[in-house]
Amino acid sequence: MSSHAITSSRMQTLFLSSQDIAQIVRKLGMRDSLTEMAEIIRENYLHWNDFDKSARLAIYSLYGVIELMPIADATHYSFKYVNGHPGNTHLGLPTVMALGALADIDTGYVRLLSELTFTTALRTAATSAVAARALARPDSRCMALIGNGAQSEFQALAFYYLLGVRSLHIFDTDPAASEKLKHNLRAIGLDQSCLDIVICPSAEQALQGADIVTTITADQSQSRVFDAELVRPGMHINAVGGDSPGKTELDPRVLQQGRVFVEFEPQTRIEGEIQQMPADFPVTELWKVLTGQAPGRQSANEVSIFDSVGFALEDFSALRFMYDKAHALGLGVSVSISPTLTNPKDLFGRLGLQSMETCTASVLEH
Ligand code: NAD
């Protein structure tokens, strides 16, 4: 994408619907979508200091949260609008829905408006994989996946393709969600010989023999999705579902069993599992591990915990990725979000009102 000055003839915004995003993923395939998404996220984490970053702006209610997530580098600005409403599935709506925009920093012109619901699931799974590749034991093959809702297939596949996980122990308080997860993974051709999938009756059973534990549940409460005593030496815990104040998944004792890694510390202190810990509880930002400025896993017995809440840099990466793919594949439609003006100072003239208005004087006479 060019960031040079734009002429009025190029002033079009690309709109990508959820159908367009689904088509991109179908054309690329899940393996390549996740692999390429993970790579662009990792690349951008390597350029951490090039980004103008802030914690997201959240409005909390009894039902959930609605957040705005802005970020920019020297050439582009992006934001995501995203909600998290754990009760939504009872209303026939997803827990998480999102949209976003990508703009040129030099003019503010919006280049892309996109759905980000599918895209968030992809980027979250890709981010989990980027973190796990730096933090989990390289010989990790078995993952417990607690919470088998909308995000779960994406997580399962990111760990299958990018980490080499070959066995999944899945658990959800809603058994139908686990059946759906297993069915969806089998339906895309991952049979027993590729991926062993065991539906477990409890989180405790799911954690038996697991090298990696992914928690991606939705509950508007301070949950304890598994007992702290179940953590084994060498485990990597990918805690993704606890992502706003009062909405956590881990017993605080889990956080004391290993080193904790976060995306953007000021945001995670408010929203992550570490909201349960003192303000000086030590954490390491992921970018420092990826750039080699801080150690990741230091021994096979160490417990690592990725306290993920989702950061704007991941959505920035995802928007750039989808924009480039849509162009390459000829997908999406051009929309006129801003009026095209022959004279940029004559906004009013573009309304075309002249011949439609009656004289003010005659209106006042009545
Ligand atoms: P979802 O509602 O589709 O699925 C959540 C599942 O968790 C449901 O099937 C529910 O039955 C299950 N569940 C709830 N409590 C449980 C428990 N104690 N044990 C086992 N299962 C339990 O939601 P989703 O879209 O899959 O999102 C899951 C969570 O991930 C949400 O909390 C969301 O806010 C969070 N999320 C985080 C990020 C991030 O970047 N960190 C990104 C997207 C979503």
Image (tube, helix red, strand yellow):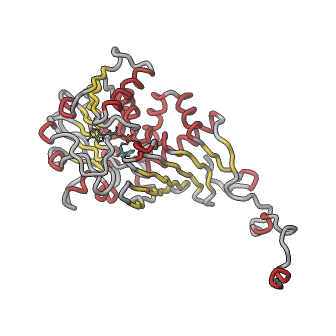
Q: Give the camera-side residue of 347 and 137.
A: 347
- The answer to whether residue 19 is visible is yes
Q: Locate residue 17 relative to residue 96 in the image: left or right.
A: right
Residue at the extreme right of the image, as rendered: 355
Residue at x-position 25% and y-position 57%: 275
Q: Would you place residue 342 above or below residue 223 in this image?
A: below
Picture coordinates of residue 193, whole percent (x, y):
34, 14
Which residue is at 35% across, 26% downward? Answer: 179
Name the image quarter holding the C terminus.
bottom right
Residue 83, percent from left and from top: 44, 52
Of the four image quadrants, the one with ligand 1 is: top left
Q: In the displayed structure, does residue 121 sit left or right of residue 266? A: right
Residue 42 can be seen, yes or no: no
Q: Residue 111: give x, y in percent of width and height.
A: 62, 51
The spot of residue 147 in percent (x, y) is 31, 37
Residue furthest out toward the left: 229
- The quadrant in which residue 226 appears is top left
* Vertical placement of residue 298 versus 111, above or below: above
> Which residue is at a point 14% across and 36% down the rendered structure image?
230
Outermost front residue: 366
Viewer-nearest residue: 178 or 48: 178
Horizontally, residue 71 falls left or right of residue 191, namely right
Q: Report the front residue among 7 and 246.
A: 246
Q: Is residue 327 above or below residue 48?
A: above
